[in-house]
């Protein structure tokens, strides 16, 4: 089992920046990939960015050049640095981890971007 806890969400003005954190605990040695997803009201949950155990990253086209995913292995934490935020980035952001035991999700953290 893997437990994920997100933090760092909040209210920010358009053009501003926010950094989200996702701390993992439990069977972290089994994690092969981690990522961030987001879900706006009335919409499906979409991929934002992923990072593999080897360090390869992938981004949604809508966030390329603005968001950066990174990790600190010593802290078992993955970060999402979000710059140049837009109102359409408003959503609940979820951390996800994939391992042999399955797919794990955090509880989500709200990011609201005001215009």
Image (cartoon, rainbow, N blue to C red):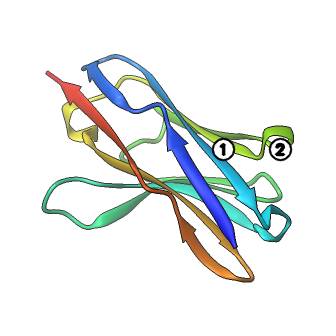
Q: Residue at x 76, y 67 (%)?
A: 31
Local secondary structure at mark 2: helix
Name the quadrant of the C terminus.
top left
Residue 79: image location, x then y, percent: 61, 38
- Mark 1, Cα crowd under 10 Å, few <14 / some 14-19 / many 20+, is many
Q: Is 70 on the left-hand or right-hand side of 36?
A: right
The Cα atoms of the two marked residues, 2 and 1, are separated by 8 Å
Residue 101: image location, x then y, percent: 70, 83
In this rendered view, identify the residue nearer to me: 94 or 53. Answer: 94
Local secondary structure at mark 1: strand
Q: Which residue is mark 1?
A: 78
How many numbered marks appear? 2
| Quarter occupied by residue 43 | bottom left
In this rendered view, identify the residue nearer to me: 35 or 55. Answer: 35
Name the quadrant of the N terminus.
bottom right
| Quarter occupied by residue 9 | top left
Q: Is residue 54 above or below residue 93?
A: below
Q: Residue at x 37, y 23 (%)?
A: 84
| Quarter occupied by residue 50 | bottom right
Q: Which residue is mark 2?
A: 73
In this rendered view, identify the residue nearer to me: 41 or 85. Answer: 41
Q: Is 1 on the left-hand or right-hand side of 85?
A: right
Q: Residue at x 57, y 56 (%)?
A: 35
């Amino acid at each position: 089992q893997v437990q994920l806890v997100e933090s760092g969400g909040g209210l920010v003005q358009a053009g501003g920046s926010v950094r989200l954190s996702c701390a993992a605990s439990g069977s972290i040695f089994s994690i092969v990939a981690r990522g961030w997803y987001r879900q706006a009201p009335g919409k499906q949950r979409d991929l934002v960015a992923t990072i593999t155990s080897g360090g390869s990253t992938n981004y949604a086209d809508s966030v390329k050049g603005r968001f950066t995913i990174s990790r600190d292995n010593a802290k078992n934490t993955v970060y999402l640095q979000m710059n140049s935020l837009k109102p359409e980035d408003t959503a609940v952001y979820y951390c996800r981890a994939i391992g042999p035991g399955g797919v794990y999700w955090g509880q989500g953290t709200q990011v609201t971007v005001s215009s």
